[in-house]
């Protein structure tokens, strides 16, 4: 969990662990089985064990904050603003978002890194009419999602999930192979019926899964 053994590191074989920790083979085997059950290591018959690539779980019914989530887990976080510009909303986008054509939006693309590794690629639109401060905000110190959560309250949200194959740019930024499966979460938020922001967040599929919890009465 400290990162001392990164993904792919060979785990010492059972007799080495027995000698290192002064415990029985049964205890070592039980511990390795427990780690495998939790998805922390991969055990291969005849080939030993290795540290697994972590799979992150995302609660799709919550507004995610990469920076705060990393801090909660004691993990280093950094973000890079790849592009930021003020644009006139295209007609098709305006229709989708319920805005007047040519409405002014801040368009910002951000790469999120956790523990030094690309975690997600975020493409975000922010409605300047409702969030005028965004016109001059550069998002260099605080990523757009965190800034919005701290600065602008929201009352309604919707999300959609899709699977895609990474194109050349996505693969390069996320450090994955071209064509590799990705999960895309699209989220829109409103305040009192006024559109605030839309984010399209692309995650490497092999390292993430999106989780939702529901109940019949709709309270979850």
Image (tube, rainbow, N blue to C red):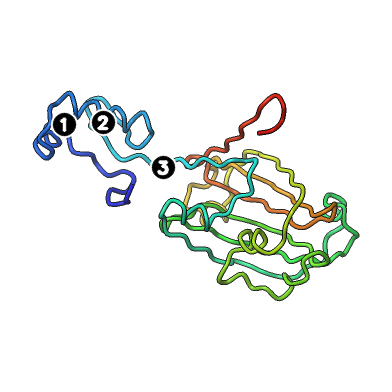
Dot 3 falls on a residue whose secondary structure is: loop
Q: Indicate the position of residue 6 as horizontal and vertical percent values.
A: 32, 49
Determine which of the numbered discs, if any, sits on residue 54 in the image. 3
Q: Are marks 2 and 1 in contact (CB under 8 Å)?
A: yes
Kindly identify which residue carries mark 1. Answer: 14
| Residue at horizontal 61 percent and vertical 69 percent from the top | 139
Judged left or right of residue 16, residue 160 is right
Q: Residue 50's mark?
A: none
Quadrant containing the C terminus in the rendered view: top right
At label 3, counting other C-alpha atoms closer than 10 Å, the crowd grade (few under 14, some 14-19, many 20 or more) is some
Residue of label 2:
32
Distance between the Cα atoms at labels 3 and 2? 16 Å
Residue furthest out toward the right: 100
Label 2: which secondary element = helix
| Residue 57 spot, x, y in % from top left | 51, 40
Q: State which quadrant residue 158 falls in.
A: top right
Disc on the earlier residue, 3 or 2: 2
If you read the primary sequence from the N terminus, does the residue marked by circle 2 or circle 1 appear first? 1
Q: Residue at x 31, y 40 (%)?
A: 51
Give whichever of discs 1 and 3 has the lower sequence position: 1
> Residue at horizontal 63%, vertical 59%?
145
Q: How far across and down, in percent of the image, does residue 107 sit?
A: 71, 64
Q: In this view, does 21 lie to the left or right of 174?
A: left
* 12 and 35: which is toward the camera: 35
Which sits in the foreground, 160 or 164?
160
Determine whether the residue tagged by mark 1 lies in a helix, strand or loop.
helix
The x, y position of residue 217, in whole percent, is: 72, 26
Position of 118 compared to 98: left or right? left
What residue sits 23% from the left and 30% below the top? 47
Q: Relative to residue 207, is residue 119 depicted above or below?
A: below
Q: How far apart are marks 1 and 3 (CA)?
A: 23 Å
The 10 Å Cα crowd at callout 1, few under 14, some 14 to 19, many 20 or more, is: some
């Amino acid at each position: 969990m400290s990162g001392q053994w990164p993904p792919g590191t060979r785990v010492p074989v059972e007799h080495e662990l027995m000698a290192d920790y002064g415990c029985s083979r049964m205890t070592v085997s039980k511990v390795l089985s427990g780690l495998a059950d939790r998805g922390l290591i991969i055990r291969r018959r005849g080939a030993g064990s290795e540290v697994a690539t972590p799979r992150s779980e995302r609660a799709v019914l919550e507004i995610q904050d990469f920076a705060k989530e990393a801090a909660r887990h004691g993990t280093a976080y950094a973000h890079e603003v790849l592009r930021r510009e003020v644009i006139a909303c295209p007609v098709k986008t305006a229709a989708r978002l319920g805005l007047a054509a040519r409405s002014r939006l801040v368009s910002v693309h951000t790469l999120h890194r956790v523990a030094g590794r690309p975690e997600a690629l975020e493409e975000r639109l922010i409605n300047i009419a409702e969030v005028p401060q965004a016109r001059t905000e550069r998002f260099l110190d605080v990523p757009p999602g965190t800034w919005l959560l701290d600065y602008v309250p929201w009352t309604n949200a919707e999300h959609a999930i899709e699977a895609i194959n990474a194109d050349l740019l996505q693969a390069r930024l996320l450090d994955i192979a071209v064509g590799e499966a990705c999960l895309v979460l699209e989220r829109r938020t409103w305040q009192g019926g006024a559109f605030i922001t839309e984010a399209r967040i692309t995650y490497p599929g092999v390292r993430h899964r999106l989780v939702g919890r529901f109940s019949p009465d709709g309270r979850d």
